[in-house]
Amino acid sequence: MTSVVGRLAAIAQAPYVASKWALEGVSEELAHELAPFGIRVAIIEPGVTKSSIFAKNIDAPNATGAYDTHYRRMFQFYAAGIANASPADEVAHVIEHAISTDEPKLRYPCSWGGHGIIEGRTKMSDEDWVELGALPDDEAYFDRFQSAFGIDLRKS
């Protein structure tokens, strides 16, 4: 079990992103190593999923300085995610399919944001992705994010 951020870097989440990228890499490598033995590896990549972690209210960050913009935008993403989060049983069904099928895929993006964010990121160059995060104006950022990923972060 990794996360959608195992495939793209999310702002203001370096330790979490690093752990998920590591799991993606190890899992993909194990898929190569174990294939000759008939063992398949499946990576579950959920986006935002309803869980107790989001049960409490998350207040807007009161950050100032260099990271204010990043935290404000991350908060908008989480607010949109909480409003649209997929039920946990959606992820459970994906896991059930991955372990019960004879031909599991290597990766299963799922739940809110899982498919669209990964698909949108693959259509962007690395330079465009970095530029998106560096946009100084929130409206320009939200417009470009919506254009790339189909998610309006202002409606949360």
Image (cartoon, rainbow, N blue to C red):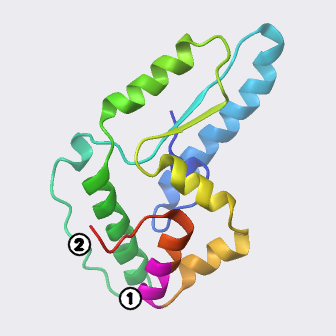
Report if residue 141 lies within the magenta region.
yes
The region drawn magenta spans 137-143
Q: Amino acid at mark 1?
A: Gly
Name the spot of residue 62 as percent of width and height, x first. Answer: 24, 79
Looking at the rendered structure, the secondary structure element under dot 2 is: loop
109 lies left or right of 155: right
Up/down of 15 relative to 136, above or below: above
- Residue corresponding to mark 2: 60
Please report the residue visible at 62 percent of the width from the left and 61 percent of the height from the top: 121
The answer to whether residue 8 is seen in the rendering is no
Looking at the rendered structure, the secondary structure element under dot 1 is: loop
Up/down of 65 relative to 155, above or below: below
Name the spot of residue 61 as percent of width and height, x first. Answer: 26, 74
- The residues bearing labels 1 and 2 have C-alpha atoms spaced at a distance of 15 Å
Up/down of 140 relative to 50, above or below: below
**Which residue reaches farthest left?**
56
Q: Which mark is residue 110?
A: none
Please report the residue visible at 31 percent of the width from the left and 48 percent of the height from the top: 85
Please report the residue visible at 72 percent of the width from the left and 26 percent of the height from the top: 30
- Residue corresponding to mark 1: 65
Report if residue 150 lies within the magenta region.
no
**Tally of numbered discs:** 2
Circle 2 packing at 10 Å, graded few (<14), some (14-19), many (20+), is some
Marks 1 and 2, the one that precedes in the sequence: 2
Q: Amino acid at mark 2?
A: Ala
